[in-house]
Amino acid sequence: MPANLPPQYYEAEKRFRLARTDKEKLVILKEMWAIMPKHKGTDRLQGELKAKLSQLKKEMQTKKKSGKSFYTHHIEKEGAAQVVLIGLPNVGKSQIVSSLTNATPQVASYPFTTREPLVGMMPFKDIKIQLIDTPPITEELIEPWLPEIVKYADYVILVVDLGSEEVLNQIDVILKRLEQSKVKLAAKEEENDELNTHFYKKTMIVGNKNDIPDAEEHFRVLKDLHGDDFLLFSISAKEREGLQELKRKIYEELAIIRVYTKESGKSADMDDPIVLKKGSRLIDAARVIHKDFAFKLKYAKVWGSSKFDGQKVDRNHLLEDGDVVEFHL
């Protein structure tokens, strides 16, 4: 007897593979169990899912008792997305985070100012994006937990010092160091292989300190050698030059959309959007609200991406940034 699993199950299964914490995995496994039809065709799958649930709960309990975890600096994602900044000592990561967010990292001219990850929230339009300042990477040293933070962030910004003649070497050091931890930085999102031998992370290179003499020439050299491999951006965090453009570029690179909801006969709530990946459909927005909500969804009315305002659409309607949705159960 075939399993005949619904599309929602496969979507949950994909989210399970991408989940970063045990808590997330547990929630998704329970969701998969609720979605799965219970009949003879799924007997084997039910057994496998029960075993996964049991094993995960056992591991979580063991970690709780021992106080151990996979890595010591897990940072819970907040806001619309999580972006991590990496770089050599004294390139200005802390200054960038301080200038873009409400965080107050220690900013100094001497190296290794940042010893622990520091989090700030960057406002952009009506959402906030989480930025993480990290300890510097060198040829001799990388914090053992840092590659894991890079791996599970939504986006990476590699910061280089445009005032240094060693600007190209800065990039080489970072790339080699992370590749030793099976993390590869890339210009585009790439499919991570099933064996997990390497983890590809979409990355932008930001050249800081463009107010320093020779910075323009160093940035040109960067473009010549890495312009085809990475998105490049030039700023001065100290002089606040290019920061607004950087915020917009980060948002664009995250490939996310904002969707607003409204109740029938009422105005839309334009202060608290649902944030989704580009390419998301109506059913994805419903699932963010609640999985039961998604099951009961019959149709919705959409203002924005529909042919006309208030058009009735089905659950597979492709959403766009700024859409207003009125759900009907």
Image (spheres, rainbow, N blue to C red):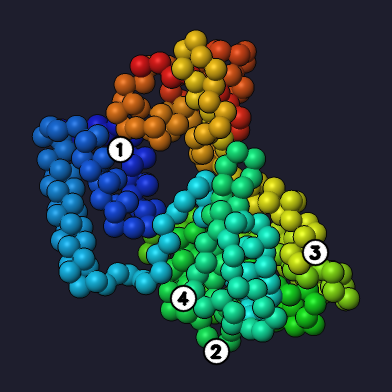
Instruction: Look at 47% across and 12% down and name the residue there.
Output: 264
Indicate the secondary structure of the residue bearing disc 1.
helix
The quarter holding residue 97 reads bottom right
Residue for badge 4: 181
Amino acid marked by disc 1? Tyr
In the displayed structure, does residue 63 sit left or right of residue 141?
left
Distance CA(mark 1)–CA(mark 4): 32 Å
Q: Residues under labels 2 and 3: Cα distance? A: 31 Å
Determine the CA span between mark 3 and mark 4: 35 Å
N-term mark: 1 or 4: 1
Q: Which of marks 3 and 4 is nearer the N terminus?
A: 4
The quadrant of the picture occupied by the C terminus is top left
Q: Where is residue 82 in the image (x, y as percent from the top left)?
A: 52, 55
Identify the mark at residue 9; answer none if there is no mark: 1
Q: What residue type is labelled 3?
A: Glu
Residue 240 % position (x, y): 77, 60
Distance (Cα) linking label 1 and label 2: 45 Å
Q: Where does the image place residue 58, in percent across and percent down from the top left?
A: 15, 61
Q: Do the residues labelled 1 and 4 touch (CB within 8 Å)?
A: no
Dot label at residue 239? 3
Which residue is found at the position 32% from the left and 51% from the top?
A: 24
The amino acid pointed to by label 2 is Glu
Query: How far separated are the C-alphas under marks 4 and 2?
Result: 14 Å
Q: Residue 140 carries which label?
A: 2
Can you give x and y, in whole percent of width and height, for residue 151 in the image? Answer: 47, 64
